[in-house]
Amino acid sequence: MSPRDPLVPTAARAIAASLAVAAATAAIASANTVTVIQLEQGSLTGSNGAAELAFASAGPVGVGAAGENLVGFDLIVRGLGQTPGGFDSTSSGSGTLGIHTVGATSFFGGPSAGLHQQTLTTGADSPTLEPADPLTTTIDTHFNFPLADIAVSLTNPTEDDSSSASSSEPVDAVPAINAATSFGTQLTGVFALGSPATSAIASNNNEWDLAHVVLRSGDRVNLQFDIGFTLGEPAERFDATLLVFDTLPGDANLDGSVDTGDLAILANNFGSVGTAQWTTASFNGDADVNTADLAILASTFGQSLGPAAAPLAVTIPEPAGLALLTLAAAGLACRRR
């Protein structure tokens, strides 16, 4: 059955036609990658349901002459009717706690790198707190508040940082005093914020921008800590593992290309509601797989990523590929009916 067959619904033919045009257009246009944060284990809601974790994407933050393939995001604690203001990375679980990397192997193969740090050329640890310090840059993992905001500190905010730059890391240019970069493993501490910091959090809908996290695309980070509240409510315990990566919209299998392999994943999961993730073809983050995700895939169909430091390589889909995409649109639209 072709998309022009009278038996194919008019809506399906319209979807098929528009997606074919979108695919052809995207194939010759420049493409942008997206940073994806996917929950692999645990929950983003606290143990008592009074707080949740959210993210503000910083997008790809790769720097250096050779390209570092780094991605960054801000970790936000959102109080659900309460004002968060305490952090404790020692009271829950066992082993390495706080904000820390997990697993020895990257999703893309090879060793996991860790949390990216900016360091002094002498190899000294970089500062752990923002703002207004030249060493807490967009490629440095750090807590997102100044030391003056802390009212009570049982264990100062600390980071585990390498003593010297990794041999795989290029030297970053600006500023010269902190040209060295390295990878650490964790951000830890036991502290509570005071006013006016907590007043500012409360006025921001109880959202606390806790930390800026930078790691290599394909690495995992574990969030294992307790969050306290300004009025002394029971602490919220978090334990969640995230996979963070940077890729093309529509690249479900994370091989750096958007092709029939990704289309097959979308087809296998088409119609899923409330359970899907990026790797099962929910590209807009709504946990569903439907024609909206098919449209996203169509917009980058035929594109591929080159090496981390190289420009994006774009190929124009062959007619057979566009025909397959058109038929898929029609077929999936029919399945919905």
Image: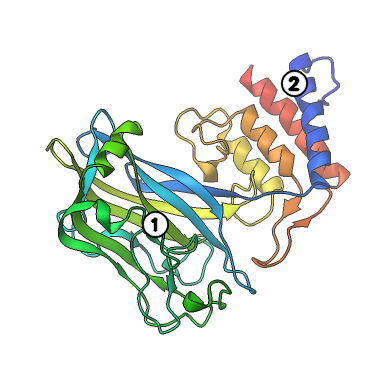
Q: Which residue is mark 2?
A: 12
Q: Nearer the viewer, residue 176 or 187?
A: 176
* Secondary element at image label 2: helix
The residue drawn where x is 32% and y is 65% is 186
Q: Specify the quadrant that holds the N terminus.
A: top right
Q: Specify the quadrant that holds the C terminus.
A: top right
**As shown in the figure, which amino acid type bears the numbered disc 2?**
Ala
Above or below 331: residue 223: below
Mark 1 → mark 2, Cα distance in angstroms: 52 Å
Crowding at mark 2 (Cα within 10 Å: few <14, some 14-19, many 20+): many
Residue 13, quarter of picture? top right
The residue drawn where x is 28% and y is 30% is 80
**Residue 9 seen anywhere in this rendered image of the structure:** no
Q: Position of residue 324 (x, y in %)?
A: 78, 38
The residue drawn where x is 41% and y is 84% is 122
**Residue 187 seen anywhere in this rendered image of the structure:** yes
Q: Is residue 152 left or right of residue 68?
A: left
Q: Which residue is mark 1?
A: 131
